[in-house]
Amino acid sequence: LQYSIGAFYMDQKDKITLFLPSLNDGGAERVFLNLASDFLARGYKVDLLVYQKFGPYEVPAGVNLISLQSRSPWISLGKLLHYIRTKKPPHILSALPEANLLNIAARLWSGKRYRCLISEHTILSANWQVKKTAFWHNIKHLLIRIFYRFADGIIVVSKAADLDMQTYCGVKPAVIYNPVYHAGIAEQAQSDPLHEWLPAARNNNVILSVGRLIPEKDHSTLLKAFALLRQSRDLKLILLGEGRCRD
């Protein structure tokens, strides 16, 4: 019995649980899949929790993908608590506001049975401004400002997000930049970019913007700035991404 308990403890200690709403085509989702791959390479076991199992991203081999099978974040809370009671994770790292709030709620509800870590990949005050007239959007941000301080640790991905978190939520996060490197990136960098403008980029006359075409990315400011630059320089602009603001 003593051996079994010890083996279970060691097994749990070497497991990391990642928590996301889905595998939708966002940057936070890609970052978490990169983290999962690296954790596996370092010998950890990885559980990846999602509300729903949808999205274009493929889960790395070896990651235990668990779908809570719920369209509503708050309905997922009961299933998340069941996961905590049965699997006893030592720590859960989440990303995106809805998952972060659920992570905090589950920790408080479960009697602090695990270490709650949350990460923010955006400027929260700017995110609020985008839909500040929407009722539920305001409720979500009110909960963020109240409950983020109950997390055991908060991670942001830039110094600007760090300053914003301190003023917006009154908490001091840790700054850890996004892990974007993977083993094949150097080889891929040598390949043909498959766009007639990009070989000319060596002359510094091409601007490349990479990101979803959504209001939060503020492409309108980029387009206005580009129009001003074009008055004095021969420049080209490539917008790489998809989203509801494409038109």
Image (cartoon, helix red, strand yellow):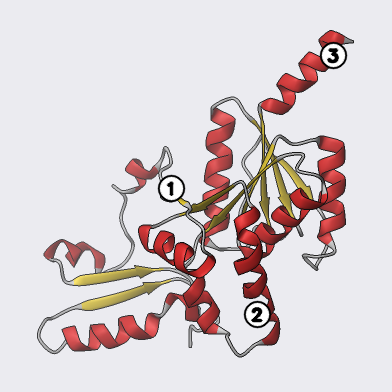
Tag 1: amino acid: Ile
- Give the mark, 3 or 1, whose residue is nearer the N terminus: 3
- Give the mark, 2 or 3, whose residue is nearer the N terminus: 3
Tag 2: amino acid: His
Specify the label residue 221 is tagged with: none
> Which residue is situated farthest in the left direction here?
232
Determine whether the residue tagged by mark 3 lies in a helix, strand or loop: helix
- Work out whether 92 lies above or below 14: below
Q: Residue at x 48, y 53 (%)?
A: 173
Q: Is residue 195 left or right of residue 173?
A: left
Residue 21 seen in render: no
Quick one: label 1, few (<14), some, or many (20+) residues within 10 Å? some
How many angstroms separate mark 2 from mark 1 (CA)?
27 Å
Q: Residue at x 41, y 80 (%)?
A: 218
Quick one: label 3, few (<14), some, or many (20+) residues within 10 Å? few
> Which residue is situated farthest in the front direction here?
170
> Which residue is situated farthest in the right direction here?
1
Q: Residue at x 84, y 13 (%)?
A: 4
Specify the label residue 176 is tagged with: 1
Q: Is residue 188 left or right of residue 33?
A: left
- Work out whether 222 lies above or below 81: below
Q: Is residue 114 left or right of residue 1?
A: left
**Residue highlighted by disc 3:** 4
> Could you say which quadrant of the image residue 21 lies in?
bottom right
